[in-house]
Each structure stands twice: as C-alpha cells, then as structure tokens.
C-alpha cells in the first residue's frame, strides 16, 4: 500500500499495490502492522456501507465527539465520490483545513480520516457505494455535524449538490474551539 499525505495532518489517500496475473488481481487493503507503524488506528469494530442512489447527493459533514472520536477508512466499492476530511482538532497544525480525495471503485483507493475530523462526500455517480471501517462503535449521543457550506472551511465542492438530507442541511455553522 502507498500512503499519500493530504492537506489535513494525519489524513492519507491510500493506494493499493495490485498483483496482476492471468486470474485477475489481488491486493492488500489493510494491514494493522503497516498502519501502526504510521501511528494510525488499527482496530475497526464497526464496518458500514452507504449506497447513494443519485449523482450530486451530499452526505456530511459528520463526526463523533469525545470521548469516542473515531478514525475512518473509506473506499468506493461502486461508482465514485468526492470525499472530504475536515480537521476539527483545535491543536492540530491543520485545524479548520480540509482535504479531498476522489474515491473510485475502479482505482480501488481509500482515504484515512483521523479521529477528530469531520467526514462528508458528494456522489459523483449514480449508485455510489462506500465502505467504511470505523475505529469506535457508534454512539448516537456523540453524533455531530457541521454545515458542509460553512465559509469558515470554504470547501471547494466540484459542483453544487442537487440533494442534501434534511438532517445534513440543518447542521449549524461551526463554532471554533479554543486552542489549548
């Protein structure tokens, strides 16, 4: 696997190194030892999939708050998405910055989003399916979100979303936390 740094500290695009032969292809997508060497989460007790039916649907910006902040590995298993990590860690050198990775089923790449970052995506194709590995069990009481179009972040989405759920559209603007 190849780990490509992004504009958010600790977030990486992960490219596979496929081995191709007459049968097809084989590639490793996760190795706890390799992740640990980079200081990344190595345990993922929750795995989820999302299927977004229509191109132009925006999901996000979601995160889980302390004490169960979660890291994520996200990859497209069908279609493509403009996937965004947003740094909400007040003591991070990239606080309030964002990074985007175009995830595609064909490329088989992934993005690693560190704990303390919000996550969201814009579907670039119909029938966009994403697979998530999540480092903490879901806790509804800690589920949070921020507005995808908050000027504090100025995320450069590739085009205007055509659909946003009521829940995601209702996310408030971010109130910056004090640095400690």
Image (tube, rainbow, N blue to C red):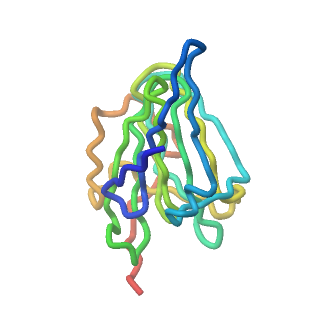
Q: Which residue shows up at 70% across the image and 55% down it?
A: 138
Residue 59 point in image, percent of width and height: 48, 40
Q: Nearer the viewer, residue 51 or 140?
A: 51
101 lies left or right of 63: left
Res. 170 visible in picture: no
Q: Nearer the viewer, residue 41 or 20?
A: 20
Q: Nearer the viewer, residue 172 or 79?
A: 79
Residue 4 point in image, percent of width and height: 37, 49
Q: Nearer the viewer, residue 45 or 58?
A: 45
Residue sitting farthest toward the bottom:
180
What is the quadrant of residue 32 in the picture?
A: bottom right
In what quadrant of the picture does the C terminus appear?
A: bottom left
131 lies left or right of 56: right
Residue sitting farthest toward the front:
21
47 relative to 53, above or below: below
Residue 13 point in image, percent of width and height: 41, 46
Residue 53 point in image, percent of width and height: 53, 22
21 relative to 98, above or below: above
Res. 89 visible in picture: yes
């Amino acid at each position: 696997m190849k780990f490509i740094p992004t504009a958010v500290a600790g977030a990486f695009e992960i490219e596979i190194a496929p081995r191709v032969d007459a049968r097809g292809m084989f590639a490793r997508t996760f190795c706890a030892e390799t992740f640990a060497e980079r200081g990344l989460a190595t345990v993922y007790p929750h795995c989820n999939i999302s299927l977004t039916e229509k191109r132009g649907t925006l999901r996000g910006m979601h995160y889980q708050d302390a004490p169960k902040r979660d890291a994520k590995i996200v990859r497209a298993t069908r279609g493509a998405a403009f996937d965004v990590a947003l740094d909400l860690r007040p003591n991070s050198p990239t606080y309030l910055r964002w990074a985007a990775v175009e995830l595609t089923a064909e490329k088989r790449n992934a993005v690693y989003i560190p704990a303390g970052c919000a996550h969201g995506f814009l579907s670039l194709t119909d029938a966009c399916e994403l697979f998530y590995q999540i480092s903490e069990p879901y806790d509804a009481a800690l589920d949070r979100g921020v507005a995808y179009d908050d000027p504090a972040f100025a995320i450069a989405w590739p085009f205007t979303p055509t659909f946003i759920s009521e829940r995601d559209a209702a996310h408030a603007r971010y109130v910056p936390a004090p640095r400690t």
